[in-house]
Image (cartoon, rainbow, N blue to C red):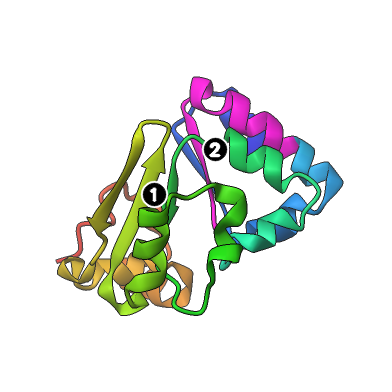
Amino acid sequence: RVERVIEDRKPTIIVIDEAWKALDNAYFAERLSNWLVTARKQNAVVVMMTQYASQLERTRTGKTIVEAVPTQVLLPNIRASAADYAMLGLTEKELDVLLGVGSASRLALVRDDRGSVVIDADLSALGPLVTILGGMEKGEALVGADYRERPDFWRVT
């Protein structure tokens, strides 16, 4: 189903939570590798999430995937260590940001091949819209089950 949407060039965001599990599945890892190469050309992006970067290192294709991802958004984790980020090749300053600020700070490190920048990722100004971003029952209750038929569903009054 995902591949049909991509082939139709419909704007698409493919979100993969707990990416380390998906990358350990041979069939899915092959699909994901293909998406990373072709998705941008077909009006799609792939977002992969995992709690610890070190989880990727233990997968079959984690190293290849990390090398193929042009932009990384990393959130601070006070329970992590420098070793947890080893495969990402972070600079000392980047590590200081991720290990030195509490996760409550709402800062994030965004990096690509040109460098990195620290951003304020505090979404509290969105008010109830943050619930929509979280999805699930709470988000659907806020916008209604028919949100797919209403392109302006996010305009909560």
Looking at the rendering, which quadrant does residue 144 occupy? bottom left
Q: Evaluate whether residue 26 shows in this view.
A: yes
**In the depicted structure, whether residue 37 falls above or below residue 85:** above
Q: Amino acid at mark 1?
A: Glu
CA separation in Å, label 2 and label 1: 33 Å
Q: Nearer the viewer, residue 30 or 65?
A: 65
Q: Residue at label 2?
A: 69
Residue 108 numbered tag: none
Region rendered in magenta: 31-49
Q: Amino acid at mark 2?
A: Val
Residue 72 part of the magenta-drawn span? no
**In the depicted structure, whether residue 6 falls above or below residue 151:** above
Residue 113, image x, y percentages: 42, 32
In front: label 2 or label 1: 2
Q: Nearer the viewer, residue 31 or 102?
A: 102
Q: Residue at label 1?
A: 149
The residue depicted at 69 percent of the width and 34 percent of the height is 33
Residue 106, image x, y percentages: 28, 69
User: Residue most toward the right?
Assistant: 26
Residue 101, image x, y percentages: 32, 73
**In the depicted structure, whether residue 61 falls above or below residue 85:** above
How packed mark 2 is, by other alpha carbons closer than 10 Å (few <14, some 14-19, many 20 or more), is: some
Residue 125, image x, y percentages: 15, 68
Which secondary structure lies at badge 1?
Answer: helix
How packed mark 1 is, by other alpha carbons closer than 10 Å (few <14, some 14-19, many 20 or more), is: few
Which secondary structure lies at badge 2?
Answer: loop
